[in-house]
Amino acid sequence: MPNKILQAKGMNRCIACYSCMLACARVVYKSFSPRYSAIQIRTRGGLQSKLAADICRGCLDAPCATVCPSEAILPRAGGGVKFNRKKCVGCAACAQKCVVQVIYFDEQDCRPVICIQCGICVGFCPHEVLSMEVR
């Protein structure tokens, strides 16, 4: 079965409830802070203040994995990455190499907050803004 990647095609339905962010932070990163979420919902600014989702695009070539010296980040078949926190040496190369700049590097923990395409955020989005889709 092919791996699925995270999509945010329904952003026009997003009300910025941050349920997706809180779910990711709590379930994946064991934190109550939305700062520790691999998905970030933000305003695009301007008078209409439309919303945008900063999410991993599930790169097929995964530049973040390519530069990881400890193989803590490995590419997944079909796009995205697997992350082994125990192998991470805290070099931040992944965050610097991310083409869409969605890897947050936590300076306190010396580890990246990185999307692993698990779909937890999708299950907690009450307005079906997010989905997991086969590429």
Image (cartoon, rainbow, N blue to C red):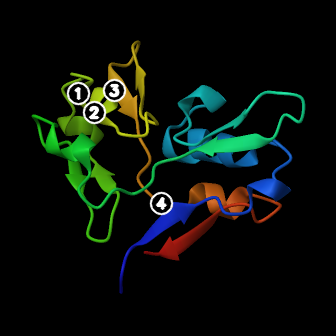
Position of residue 13 measured from the top left corner of the image (x, y, whole percent) = 84, 58
- Mark 2 in CB contact with mark 1 (< 8 angstroms): yes
Circle 4 sits on which residue? 118
Circle 2 sits on which residue? 97
Q: Is mark 1 on a helix, strand or loop?
A: helix
Circle 1 sits on which residue? 93
- Tell me the amino acid under the disc marked 4: Cys
- Is 88 rendered above or below residue 133? above
Q: In this view, does 76 lie to the left or right of 46?
A: left
The image quarter in which residue 33 lies: top right
Circle 3 sits on which residue? 111
The image quarter in which residue 4 lies: bottom left
- Mark 1 in CB contact with mark 4 (< 8 angstroms): no
Q: Distance between the residues labelled 2 and 1?
A: 6 Å
Residue at image x 46%, y 36%? 102
Q: Is mark 4 on a helix, strand or loop?
A: loop
